[in-house]
Image (cartoon, helix red, strand yellow):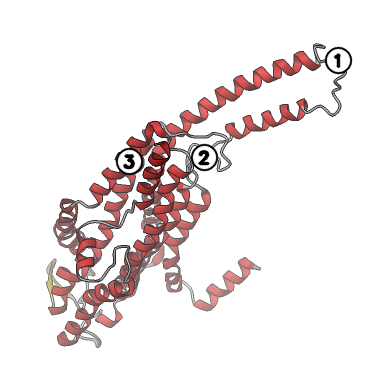
Amino acid sequence: MREQANYSASAASSDFSLVLGGPLYQLFRRARLSGDTLELLHRRIMVIALIAWLPLLVLALLDGVAVGSSVKVPFLFDVDAHVRFLLSLPILIAAEIIVHQRMRVVVGQFVTQGLVHDAVRAGFNRALENAARLRNSVTAELLLIASVYGVGIFVVWRYYMALDVPTWYAIPDAGRVQPKLAGWWYFFVSLPIYQFILLRWYFRFIVWTRFLWQVSRLPLAYQPLHPDGNGGIGFLAGMTRAFAPLVFAQGATLAGALANTILYEGGVLTSFYVEIVMFATVVVFVIVGPLLVFLPPLAAAKRLGLREYAQLSRQYADEFADKWIRGAQPKGETLVGSSDIQSLADLGNSYDKVRGMSVVPITRGAVAQLVVAALLPLVPLLLTLISLEELLKRIVKVLV
């Protein structure tokens, strides 16, 4: 019976996915743009990217703003639009497969690593069910759509992101925006598609955070002596690397927006350092922040481990002193060659291992990888400050 329960918990955790669910996923399946486990990736990317980008090209040609000097920013020279719809959007779609495959392995390790014992298995399964239910919520995705149009387009984009110069999508007029033919598709189809898919990822982070929070409240079988230095949940840090493509996609979108501002509004890259640092900080925190819910239980496990090993160490040290220092050793047994000293040293190493246990399941390597993913798309913008030749010289000088 116990083996059957173990199998059921392991199977449930291995089948859990952060991305296999929700109305859009079901729509893709019915439209034959996705299989049950996200097959047909190339078809999804091609259809969604073409819906978001190709009509803009056609309508811009009809408007006469695809090329030429009738507007300051013709469509074919809009860096932001091409990066957003031909690079960032496909990456956001492709990242689903990476996260799905990695998520199944990571969540399954709560069971296979022995953290979920019999007493907490029911609670762990409830956390899985709650996460799947929230992931599949129709109401949540409807609210995301409302947010995209109510806030993302008519507030954030209109007042903070749109260029204040004549472009292929709109002409600014006394503080108002007069959309062109291509602009209507841009505002009501292309941008909402991108923003919805991006916000959907942030909603998934809410689902992931809630799941981890519920699991962290369970009395898991943490092991302070575990070699990962995180009480046995060090595998969670590996999940952060699966989210690196999402960070890169957002960095590319930021790079495209800054490129437009620099090229067409006279901006300078150095004036955006604060925004770049804030962007990198926020997106990295969104990825690693959910793991902080394990800080209290890990800290408690560490304190308990220190007390237990301190008690064991004192007991062993007293017995060692009685045997070898106070003359209670058995007759004929010599100190030379005895395993007692090595055992005492091993016990000390075990205590040091518990004392060195980290209560934050986040590695520097994982954070560094996310920071690089966020900032890498911004590197080409350095060419707006110095020439490519000078940049290469400085890189070679640093490396050599």
Left or right: residue 385 versus residue 29 is right
Q: Rounded to the nearest whole Å, what is the CA distance between mark 3 and mark 1?
A: 58 Å
Q: Rounded to the nearest whole Å, what is the CA distance between mark 3 and mark 2?
A: 23 Å
Picture coordinates of residue 284, whole percent (x, y): 40, 52
The amino acid sitting under disc 3 is: Asn
**Residue at point 19% right, 80% down?**
55
Q: In this figure, which residue is indicated by the disc labeled 1?
A: 331
Q: Rounded to the nearest whole Å, what is the CA distance between mark 1 and mark 2?
A: 44 Å
Left or right: residue 58 versus residue 325 is left
Q: In this figure, which residue is indicated by the disc labeled 3?
A: 125
Closer to the chain start, of discs 3 and 1, is: 3
**Residue at point 80% right, 17% down?**
324
Q: How crowded is mark 2: few (under 14 residues within 10 Å), some or many (20 or more)?
A: many
Q: How crowded is mark 1: few (under 14 residues within 10 Å), some or many (20 or more)?
A: few
The amino acid sitting under disc 1 is: Lys
**Residue at point 42% right, 56% down?**
102
Which label sits on residue 230?
Answer: 2
